[in-house]
Image: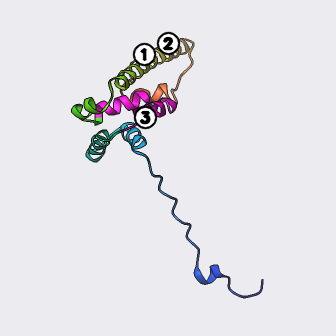
Amino acid sequence: MSGRPSSRDVLGPVASPAPPVMALIPEEQLLVDCCRLESDDSTRARVDALLGRNLDWSYVVETAIRHAVAPLLQHGLLATASEEKRRAAVPHAVQTQLDEAYRLSGIRTRRLLRLAGEIAETLADLGISVIGLKEVGLAGDVYGDPA
């Protein structure tokens, strides 16, 4: 300790630089916007604008599948985009693939909910209380739609 003030003493604490804002390509922005649980007018307008662009639908579908959000993408497209824009922009093969992912997800979720209910009933019959902590237990409350 030399007794001399440090630069921190003179300048005060140095602020960390702000983290960089991640720029999304249009296909990724579409996924983010369509996978929101709730959307506002600006989100719906952005989705309609994105659907007006020449999107790489193979990338959109592959990314949605890789991140296990294809059913949520389909739900978001139905809830967020105008039907006219959606029909004009989403290729038929992509729409068919998203419809199937949505349908299969609904079947899987309903099956899991039924099994969870059966397990809870069996445990209740044995005097064991059950508390649903994640996923299946919260699905209905958070998402509403079983798909």
- Type of residue at label 3? Val
Residue 132 horizontal/vertical position (percent) = 51, 26
The N terminus appears in which quarter of the rendering? Answer: bottom right
Q: Residue at x 59, y 74 (%)?
A: 13
Q: Is residue 67 left or right of residue 3?
A: left
Label 2 crowding class (10 Å Cα cut-off): few <14, some 14-19, many 20+?
few
Which residues are drawn in magenta? Answer: 55-79
Label 3 crowding class (10 Å Cα cut-off): few <14, some 14-19, many 20+?
many
Q: Residue at x 40, y 22 (%)?
A: 97
- Type of residue at label 2? Glu
Q: Secondary structure at mark 2?
A: helix
Q: Is residue 43 left or right of residue 17?
A: left
The C terminus appears in which quarter of the rendering? Answer: top left
User: Which residue has dot 2 on it?
Assistant: 118
Image: 6 above or below 40:
below
Residue 81 horizontal/vertical position (percent) = 27, 36
Dot placed on the residue nearer the N-terminal end, 1 or 2: 1
- Residue 26 position by quadrant: top left
Give how far apart the Cα atoms at labels 3 and 1 are.
23 Å
Q: Residue at x 29, y 36 (%)?
A: 80
Image: 112 above or below 45:
above
User: Which residue has dot 1 on it?
Assistant: 107
Give how far apart the Cα atoms at labels 1 and 2 are.
17 Å
Q: Residue at x 58, y 81 (%)?
A: 11
Dot placed on the residue nearer the N-terminal end, 2 or 3: 3
